[in-house]
Image: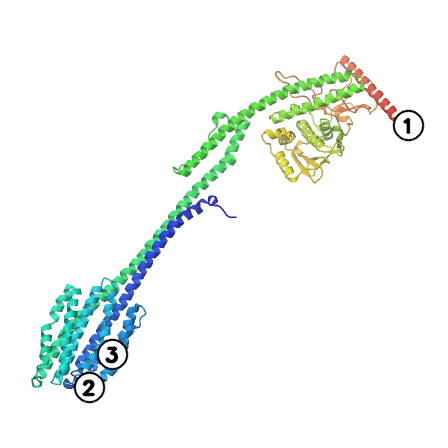
């Protein structure tokens, strides 16, 4: 499942928001660090190139000395071993530096040229200053090895840098010094033979022009301190004079002093220039090393600074995200606690009347911060405060509606009781079985009206009104509940546990079972029976099951209905469609009774678990006379006691019970008396109520006076005789019908 951006977490959103600038800063930092590292690498390459340049300059100076003093070897018998050893040492050093792989392409090419030229050094040493290899050829051969070495500084100077001027000055000075060395070699060769050839004098004079050019460039690029030393070291007039005079000196005039003077003076000038050359080369090397160190330090400093900045940014972002998420989590916990605990508790207190409207306070949700999250917390606090206010107003309205419902229900209840008294009186005076049957139907409707009125009291949060004073057997409670159902003839009591129910539970259990039985008869076929069973469990509880043979209920619907039975919900519009469930739920919650529906495809079973706390410990034994056997009509006695209901053998499906109100209230009727039982049905007619009979309650009215007892006994006698007459007629008709069918 792909989450949309609006479904992302706050931490994810903030991380993505910070990702782009961090990535951009990182890219710029990486580019800067890379540039610094590249500059550092260039400086390192420059430093290595500078080392090669210094080695090349030193090697060129050694080659110059070897060439110049070799020209005097024939006459002055100069030992060339030290000069050649110095040359070989510097050559080895140079070749070692030249093999480094840190040079640029141009530098590599020039080093390769120098290596190629130096390969003929051994051959030049053999041929130098011989008959086949005169002084000019020897000078040219050494120059072919020296010139490439002196061109390396110019290649380094092309790469730029702060030491480019020094490198350029070094290159110019080295070339000018090399030209003076060539003049020294040529004149040494001529003076040692006591004759300077024209070619030697001409070649030596040609170097004068090169010196002017190179020394002018040196003076342009060199520093002031180098210029001062240069002026002190160079004696250009002496060199030019000796070169000009060399061609005019006669052989007899050339002696040892001239050779010595020329060689000594030229060597001093060359050595002084070489000292300046070495100082410039060392300064170039120091500058290159410093620049390389500075470039590396800059690269590492920039890298460290960027890493520190990124780390600081990351830590700051994490801290901000955690602080924000922590505040949101705190707001969420506070809101959920207020929504799930504090607000429902406050609403329940308001609904139960335990909290006055003036005592209500908003649920505290303010986080105490001044940011947007704090504003949201205060907004939530206002929302919850308004919810509490509306809840209080709704509780007041609900209480008013419940009070009106309770008042109207009690008034209607009083009228129903009076209606039942009137119907009872009419039944006692009527002898016609047809009229008695109609009166019973009216009586049954009035009894159901009384139950519906009690439903209104239950939904309004009031007690139904009927109060029982003594425990009653469970079988009588089931029969009494069946008598309050419209289709009571379909209810069949299969088995019943031999237990007694406590007095305070009797009427509520009767009402609860009546609602379940009524529901079972309404949602099953009229031709089927509704079975009611009860049994005791090992834990001491009593299980009562009401099973019908209807079409059953879907699993989802059963689950929803069971949830309604397990919690006492507030009355709303759905109560009109499922009033029985609301009444069962509320009556069950009063005594800890558990009610549950189940369906196995066909039919529905309503299970009621009566806890052991609702079962009487022992069976009460009231001092009552036994009931006469069925079919016997007792003789009326003036002081006879009323027949107890618990000793009668009631039918499987009893008509609706009823009680009389024990006393009349001042404004509206009090709760009526205990539930009455019905007498066995008259022959051929509907069941008849036994006047003033109850489920063995102490609220049985005071026995009537002798006159009233005599009149009631007479009415009972008339009722029994009327029933006997009706039954005899129906039996006769059935007998005649059978004979007619037999004749046919």
In the image, 462: left or right of 228? right
In the image, 133: left or right of 708? left
Q: Nearer the viewer, residue 670 or 102?
A: 102
Residue 735, how many percent across, how many down?
A: 89, 26
Residues at marks 2 and 1, CA–CA distance in whole angstroms: 175 Å
Q: Give SS at disc 3.
A: helix
Mark 2 or 1, nearer chain start = 2
Q: Give SS at disc 2.
A: loop
Residues at marks 3 and 1, CA–CA distance in whole angstroms: 159 Å
In the image, 363: left or right of 424? left
Q: Give SS at disc 1.
A: helix
Residue wearing tag 2:
130
Q: Nearer the viewer, residue 81 or 211?
A: 211
Q: Cβ–Cβ below 8 Å for labels 3 and 1?
A: no
Which image quadrant is residue 443 in? top right
Residue 708, how many percent across, how many down?
A: 76, 14
Local packing at callout 2 (Cα closer than 10 Å; few below 14, some 14-19, many 20+) is: few
Which image quadrant is residue 142 in? bottom left
Name the residue: 68% across, 19% down: 416
Q: Residue furthest right?
A: 743
Q: Which mark is residue 739?
A: 1
């Amino acid at each position: 499942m792909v989450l949309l951006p609006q479904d992302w977490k706050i931490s994810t959103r903030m991380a993505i928001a910070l990702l782009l600038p961090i990535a951009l800063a990182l890219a710029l930092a990486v580019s800067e660090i890379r540039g610094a590292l590249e500059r550092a690498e260039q400086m390192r390459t420059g430093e290595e190139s500078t080392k090669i340049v210094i080695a090349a300059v030193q090697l060129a100076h050694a080659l110059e000395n070897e060439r110049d003093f070799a020209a005097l070897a024939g006459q002055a018998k100069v030992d060339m071993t030290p000069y050649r050893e110095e040359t070989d040492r510097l050559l080895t050093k140079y070749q070692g530096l030249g093999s480094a792989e840190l040079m640029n392409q141009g530098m590599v090419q020039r080093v390769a040229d120098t290596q190629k030229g130096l390969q003929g050094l051994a051959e030049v040493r053999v041929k130098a200053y011989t008959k086949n290899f005169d002084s000019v050829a020897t000078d040219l051969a050494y120059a072919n090895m020296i010139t490439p070495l002196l061109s390396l500084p110019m290649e380094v100077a092309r790469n730029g840098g702060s030491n480019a001027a020094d490198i350029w000055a070094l290159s110019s000075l080295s070339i000018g010094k090399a030209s003076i060395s060539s003049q020294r070699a040529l004149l040494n060769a001529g003076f040692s033979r006591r004759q300077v050839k024209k070619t030697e004098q001409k070649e030596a004079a040609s170097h004068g022009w090169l010196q002017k050019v190179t020394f002018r460039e040196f003076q342009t690029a060199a520093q002031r301190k180098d210029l001062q030393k240069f002026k002190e070291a160079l004696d250009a007039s002496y060199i030019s004079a000796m070169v000009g005079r060399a061609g005019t000196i006669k052989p007899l005039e050339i002696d040892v002093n001239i050779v010595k003077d020329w060689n000594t003076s030229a060597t001093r000038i060359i050595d002084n220039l070489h000292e300046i050359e070495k100082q410039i080369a060392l300064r170039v090397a120091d500058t290159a090393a410093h620049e390389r160190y500075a470039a590396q330090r800059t690269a590492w400093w920039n890298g460290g600074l960027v890493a520190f900045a990124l780390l600081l940014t990351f830590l700051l972002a994490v801290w901000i995200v955690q602080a924000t998420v922590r505040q949101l989590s705190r707001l969420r916990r506070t809101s959920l606690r207020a929504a799930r605990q504090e607000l429902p508790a406050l609403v329940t207190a308001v609904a139960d009347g335990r909290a006055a409207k003036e005592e209500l306070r908003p649920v505290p949700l303010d986080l105490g911060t001044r940011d947007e999250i704090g504003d949201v917390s205060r907004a939530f606090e206002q929302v919850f405060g308004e919810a509490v206010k509306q809840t209080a107003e709704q509780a007041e309205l609900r209480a008013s509606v419940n009070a009106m419902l309770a008042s109207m229900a009690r008034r209607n209840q009083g009228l129903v009781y009076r209606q039942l008294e009137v119907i009872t009186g009419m039944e006692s005076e009527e002898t016609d079985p047809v009229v008695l049957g109609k009166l019973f139907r009216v009586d049954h409707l009035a009894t159901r009206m009384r139950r519906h009125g009690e439903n209104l009291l239950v939904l309004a949060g009031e007690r139904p009104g009927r109060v029982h004073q003594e425990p009653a057997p469970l079988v009588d409670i089931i029969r009494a509940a069946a008598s309050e159902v419209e289709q009571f003839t379909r209810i069949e009591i299969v088995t019943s546990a031999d237990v007694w129910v406590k007095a305070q539970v009797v009427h509520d259990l009767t009402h609860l079972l009546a609602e379940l039985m009524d529901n079972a008869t309404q949602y099953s076929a009229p031709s089927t029976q509704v079975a009611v069973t009860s049994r005791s469990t090992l834990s001491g509880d009593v299980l009562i099951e009401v099973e019908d043979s209807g079409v059953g209920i879907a699993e989802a619907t059963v689950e929803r209905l069971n949830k309604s039975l397990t919690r006492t919900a507030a009355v709303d519009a759905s109560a009109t469609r499922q009033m029985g469930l609301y009444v069962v739920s509320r009556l069950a919650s009063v005594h800890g009774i558990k009610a549950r529906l189940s369906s196995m495809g066909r039919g529905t079973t309503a299970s009621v678990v009566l806890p052991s706390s609702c079962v009487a410990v022992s069976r009460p034994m009231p001092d009552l006379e036994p009931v006469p056997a069925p079919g016997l009509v007792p003789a009326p006695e003036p002081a006879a006691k009323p027949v107890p209901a618990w000793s009668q053998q009631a039918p499987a499906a009893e008509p609706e019970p009823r009680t009389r109100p024990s006393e009349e209230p001042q404004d509206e009727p009090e709760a009526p008396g205990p539930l009455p039982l019905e007498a066995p049905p008259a022959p051929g007619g509907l069941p008849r109520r036994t006047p003033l009979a109850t489920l063995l309650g102490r609220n049985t009215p005071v026995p009537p006076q002798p006159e009233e007892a005599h009149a009631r006994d007479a009415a009972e006698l008339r009722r029994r005789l009327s029933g006997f007459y009706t039954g005899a007629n129906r039996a006769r008709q059935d007998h005649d019908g059978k004979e007619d069918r037999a004749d046919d």
